[in-house]
Amino acid sequence: MLEEFRLFEDLSEAELGQIRQQAVSRTFPKNTVIVSEGDDTTSLYLIESGRVKFFLGDEEGREVILNFQGAGAYFGELALLDSSPRSVSVMTVEPTTLLVVSREDFFACLRSNPEIALKLLGHLAGRLRELSDEVRALALTDVYSRVTRLLERHAEERDGERLVPGRMTHQQISQMVGSSREMVSRIMKELVAGGYLSVDSEGIRLLKPFPKGW
């Protein structure tokens, strides 16, 4: 399973075995907060199965959803490097199993496997580029472009289809693209009517390329 994580994909079986020995498997039910913004936890979390959301909240209960991630993704790597408090909160949106590696155990692996450190740095650089792209999209594109871009980014290939899993709601989409739920609902309704996507219990299916404008 570890070889399916991008961070570890080039490691040997022996190197993967060292990490497996340090990882603790934990299963969480739906709607469980794994880490909260401001926490001092310093573990790396690998998503073995399930799905989580990343969000920011305030004292009045409002939240901004930053992202969703599923099996094969991981989080917590920033806290490994600088021991700073968590910058976002993470909550399960379906039953989820995580492999948890403590900072001390992960650093022991880094000392004996420098390749992991290099891949971690490459991953962080990639995330910085993604963040720049997201800021550019929020600042320079219209709501329709932000919605379709979001759907494209979260779509997964499954049996020849492109599926955004987890039945992402219009409210969640609106929080992620910085728009009103009403505007997102209008866009989604027209995309369904035009045969560009469909929605069922498994999620949002992307049926054909989106038009360039709305």
Image: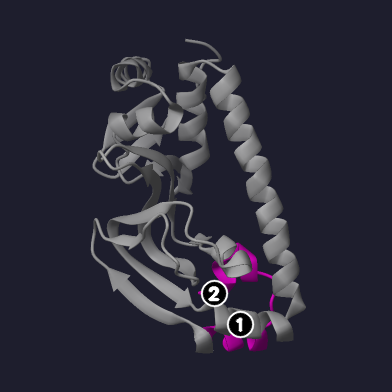
Q: Are marks 2 and 1 in contact (CB under 8 Å)?
A: yes
Span of residues in magenta: 1-20
For label 2, the residue is 2
Residue depicted at 26% across the width and 60% down the height: 32
Which residue is at the front of the view, 1 or 33? 33
Instruction: Please determine whether, in this image, residue 96 is positioned above or below residue 181.
Output: below
Q: Which residue shows up at 51% across the image and 34% down it?
A: 152
| Looking at the image, residue 137 lies above or below residue 89 | above
Mark 1 lies on a secondary structure that is helix
Residue 16's label in the rendered image is 1
Specify whether residue 10 is painted magenta. Answer: yes
CA gap between label 2 and label 1 equals 7 Å
How many other residues sit within 10 Å of disc 1, few (<14), some (14-19) or many (≥20)?
A: some
Residue type at tag 1: Leu
101 over 55 or under it: above or below = below
Q: Amino acid at mark 2?
A: Leu
In the orientation shown, which residue stands out farthest toward the top?
214
Would you identify the image quadrant in which residue 136 lies?
Answer: top right
Q: Residue at x 27, y 56 (%)?
A: 94
- Give residue 151's quadrant in the image: top left
Name the dominant secondary structure of the magenta segment. Answer: helix
Left or right relative to 87: residue 82: right
Tell which circle, 2 or 1, labels the residue nearer the N-terminal end.
2
